[in-house]
Amino acid sequence: NAGVMQNPRHLVRRRGQEARLRCSPMKGHSHVYWYRQLPEEGLKFMVYLQKENIIDESGMPKERFSAEFPKEGPSILRIQQVVRGDSAAYFCASSPPQGNEKLFFGSGTQLSVL
Amino acid sequence: QKEVEQNSGPLSVPEGAIASLNCTYSDRGSQSFFWYRQYSGKSPELIMSIYSNGDKEDGRFTAQLNKASQYVSLLIRDSQPSDSATYLCAVNVRNYGQNFVFGPGTRLSVLP
């Protein structure tokens, strides 16, 4: 019974490159959330998705960031033209359809921008 | 603006003592409240959820909720060094859409 799977665990990019972070929710879960965490800080909500729908992207920067959760395959968080300030841990969480509000987190992707 | 506040700590307690972690939230419409534990370099792990006023106990953990005061707390009895971690308070600020807002976390250190 696999949990929330994120890959890669560590991602190194140079400034200006693109970063793609992947998240496969737990089996039976249809809701995916992305959070960003800077060192010694809390989790900052970025986006909430269901299959083929973005429900809430109020935490996403207006430029360079996008997210999708296609009908088939993992959810993708895409960061274009990365800058050093994008360096952070990015966590994905999933939850089942209505009736259970608990979030279960993946192990995260540590993005380092050189 | 929906906010969740916690004392960042560090909170230091001796082994065997009770650790008390506090959280306040701004949205009176919040319905669901959660405590997560996060070890350094690891992902958050759910340890408690609470939905109605009062106390909820699970082993050494007790969550307390007071919606009138917009206050939720976590008590850890018989604290162990393995409890040393950052504790994140999370609030679901919507009935639908499940917008979870996390506090900045309180770093707990249990001294042997």
Image (cartoon, coloured by chain):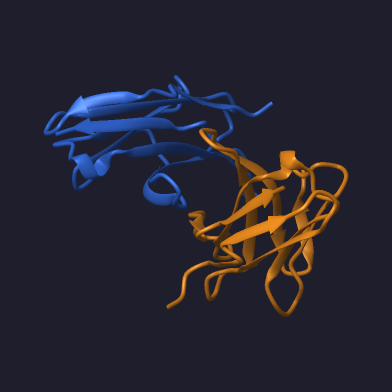
Chain colours: A orange, B blue
Is residue B112 something that shows in the picture?
yes
Q: Is residue A72 left or right of residue B28?
A: right
Give the total of numbered labels: 0
Residue B49 on image: x %, y %? 39, 46
Q: Quadrant of the C terminus of chain B?
A: top left
Q: Residue at x 28, y 31 (%)?
A: B109
Q: Nearer the viewer, residue A62 or A21?
A: A21
Residue A8 on image: x %, y %? 61, 66
Is residue B56 something that shows in the picture?
no
Residue A28 on image: x %, y %? 54, 74
Q: Residue at x 51, y 55 (%)?
A: A103
Q: Nearer the viewer, residue A112 or B45?
A: A112
Q: Is residue A94 left or right of residue B45?
A: right
Which of the 4 image quadrants contains residue B79? top left
Residue lying at the far right in this picture: please name it. A63
Which of the 4 image quadrants contains residue A45? top right
Is residue B27 placed above or below A75 in the rendered structure? above
Residue A50 on image: x %, y %? 70, 64
Is residue A76 placed above or below B39 in the rendered structure? below
Is residue B17 placed above or below B40 in the rendered structure? above
Q: Quadrant of the N terminus of chain B?
A: top right
Which of the 4 image quadrants contains residue B40? top left
Q: Is residue B53 left or right of residue A110?
A: left
